[in-house]
Amino acid sequence: MPSCQPNLAAPRRSAATPSAGDTAPPRLRIAAPCCHQRPGKIARALPSWPTLAAFLQRRLGAALLICGILIAPAAQAWNAAGHRLCAYIAWQSLDLMTRQHVAVLLRLHPDHSRWLARARDADPDLAAFVEASTWADELRRDPRFHAEEEAPTALLPGFPDTLRHRDWHYVDRPLSGSRSGAATDGELPRQLERMIHIVGDRNADARRRAWALPWLIHLVADAHQPLHVGSRFDERGRSDDGGNALLVDNPFVARRHIGSLHRYWDELPGPPWLRGSTLVLAAQGIVAEHPPPAPAGRLKQWLDESLAVARDEAYPADKVEPPTITARFNERARRTAAQRVAWSGYRLAGLLQQGLRSHPDASRDDR
Ligand SMILES: [Zn+2]
């Protein structure tokens, strides 16, 4: 199998990564839950933290205890590399007029100045576009916003509501069986279609379009993440929430750890700090390996592709609990993830150019 670009494909080796010379048993740590857990569902799917160690002790037995278990710190930030890469690749594919239109809309977003403050790109329009790609995930930790089950926070200018909308990021579709492909949970397809409509609606309020645009940028990438679309269901019809409830042992990280399969896939595109020149290099590597698909297709095709990847590639075949990620599985998964990111970038650009083409006078939105 051909190798991917170095910063995307090469296993992140460390002293804890198995190699021919390794003799000491690796230390395992339990990664914190991924912040793409499904609202209200993961609590039943995974044991609570106080019981997780006991859960693993039961599952792994004495061998794991001999190796030693490190409990990772509290929840890490969502790995944003995939979203920034998607946005950067899309920006490179946009024509000048669409870039200008997108930039004008994003300047109307209430958080535009926040994006520029942390960006590392010289071009402020590109910087805002790339940073806007992770805004929908940042709502999960933003105290101005609240979860569905929490008390509402105060309404803010420029936002239609202050909900975090955690169920907009995924759709739960069974991998196989009589219900294969039928969504059971999650709003991703519906909300992405809605954002496409709002952004492209020249009669819509410009600030509403500015609010919808970061959602559109974000959800196109989510639609290409296989485990944001497919879930494994057991014989009692219970979903594993896109691999959130399946723990895997991943030796291909700096510190070997046991974490969810969903998190493993979320982190495949690169490290969460990927920005600036390293982001550019990574994007160039992906684009060189993965040209635009033909045809580009529409949302249904993107979701069907993600479901097929989830069914055929996303789950380790190892029946031991937790399964260990093998070198072969890791290589294939990294390459598939890079392709999904590249395609999401090309397709995001196509959507924006198609949706905004009928608005040649971008300045009319600057009001
Ligand atoms: Zn998301």
Image (cartoon, rainbow, N blue to C red):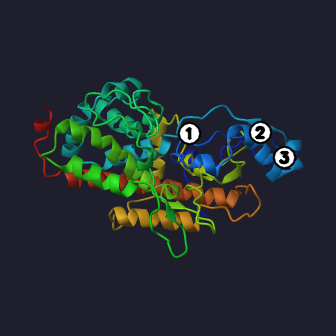
**Residue at the location (42% across, 51% down)?**
221
Q: Is residue 323 left or right of residue 5?
A: right
Label 3 with label 2: CB-CB less than 8 Å: no
Q: Do we see residue 342 in this rendering?
A: no
The CA span between labels 1 and 2 is 18 Å
Q: Count neighbours of disc 2 (C-alpha within 10 A) and say few if under 14, some if 14 to 19, many if 20 or more.
A: few
Residue 364, percent across and down? 10, 37
Residue 209, percent across and down? 22, 41
Q: Is residue 301 left or right of residue 196?
A: right
Q: Nearer the viewer, residue 342 or 188?
A: 188
> Is 271 drawn above or below residue 265 in the view shown?
above
* Dot 2: element: loop
Among the two numbered marks 1 and 2 on one chain, the one whose residue lies closer to the N terminus? 2
The CA span between labels 3 and 2 is 18 Å
> Is 295 drawn above or below residue 172 in the view shown?
below
Instruction: Point out the frontmost of discs 3 and 2.
Output: 3
Q: Do we see residue 224 in this rendering?
A: yes
What residue is disc 2 on?
Answer: 15
Q: Amino acid at mark 3?
A: Leu
Label 1 with label 3: CB-CB less than 8 Å: no
Q: Is residue 56 left or right of residue 123?
A: right
What residue is disc 1 on?
Answer: 271
Q: Amino acid at mark 2?
A: Ala
**Residue at the location (43% across, 67% down)?**
304
Q: Amino acid at mark 1?
A: Pro
Residue 278, percent across and down? 49, 37
Query: Does ligand 1 reach within 8 Å of label 2's beta carbon?
Result: no
Q: Which mark is residue 64?
A: 3
